[in-house]
Image (cartoon, helix red, strand yellow):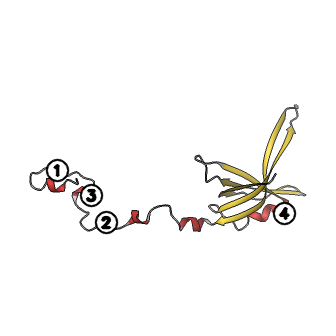
């Protein structure tokens, strides 16, 4: 099965030498489209462990992967089933620095205040009726 997943790189683990003939490297990607954060674990095997080099947490990436499953039987005979998302391609879509340079806020939210905006109406305090110009300070 060939699948693709796009998200933000969260963590890159060190390469593990499982045996003299097998090595793997795990990395975690966050799903950007889900309402609740989903942390997805992928594995790179053998000569693919270096595909993640040059990437950093925060980078937006696309992962090509195969879904693998296997059965494991313990000493008592109980069966357990495991799934692995085995990555075979990792493409960088945007770096963390590029994402930071395009903030999601309106540039006018950070604008300087207008002259005269330092009166009581905008200070967060309510005007007090002291009898003189109280009516002029009501904002409506």
Tag shown at residue 128: 1
Q: Residue at x 68, y 65 (%)?
A: 92
Marks 3,2: beta carbons within 8 A: yes
| Residue 105 horizontal side relative to residue 131, left or right | right
Q: CA distance from mark 3 to mark 2?
A: 10 Å
- Pointer 4 residue: 47
| Residue 12 horizontal side relative to residue 77, left or right | left
Earlier sequence position, callout 3 versus callout 2: 2
Marks 3,4: beta carbons within 8 A: no
Mark 3, Cα crowd under 10 Å, few <14 / some 14-19 / many 20+, is: few
Q: Residue at x 22, y 51 (%)?
A: 126
Q: CA distance from mark 4 to mark 2?
A: 58 Å
Counting every numbered tag in the picture gives 4
For mark 2, give the secondary structure: loop
Looking at the rendered image, the disc whose residue lies closer to the viewer, 3 or 4, is 3
- Pointer 3 residue: 122
For mark 4, give the secondary structure: helix
Q: CA distance from mark 4 to mark 1?
A: 74 Å
For mark 3, give the secondary structure: helix
Tag shown at residue 104: none
Q: Residue at x 64, y 63 (%)?
A: 59
Earlier sequence position, callout 4 versus callout 2: 4
Q: Nearer the viewer, residue 49 or 37?
A: 37
Q: Position of residue 137 (x, y in %)?
A: 18, 56
Q: Nearer the viewer, residue 67 or 27?
A: 67
Marks 4,2: beta carbons within 8 A: no
């Amino acid at each position: 099965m060939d699948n693709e997943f796009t998200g933000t790189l969260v963590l890159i683990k060190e390469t593990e030498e499982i045996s003299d003939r097998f090595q793997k490297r795990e990395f975690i990607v966050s799903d950007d489209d889900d309402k609740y954060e989903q942390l997805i674990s992928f594995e790179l095997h053998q000569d693919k462990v270096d595909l993640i080099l040059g990437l950093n947490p925060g980078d937006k990436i696309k992962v090509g992967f195969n879904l693998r499953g296997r059965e494991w039987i313990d000493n008592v005979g109980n069966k357990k089933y495991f799934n692995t998302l085995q990555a075979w391609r990792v493409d960088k879509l945007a770096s963390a620095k590029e994402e930071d340079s395009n903030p999601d806020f309106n540039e006018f939210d950070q604008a300087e205040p207008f002259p005269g905006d330092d009166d009581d109406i905008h200070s967060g305090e309510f005007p007090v009726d002291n009898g003189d110009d109280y009516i002029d300070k009501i904002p409506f």
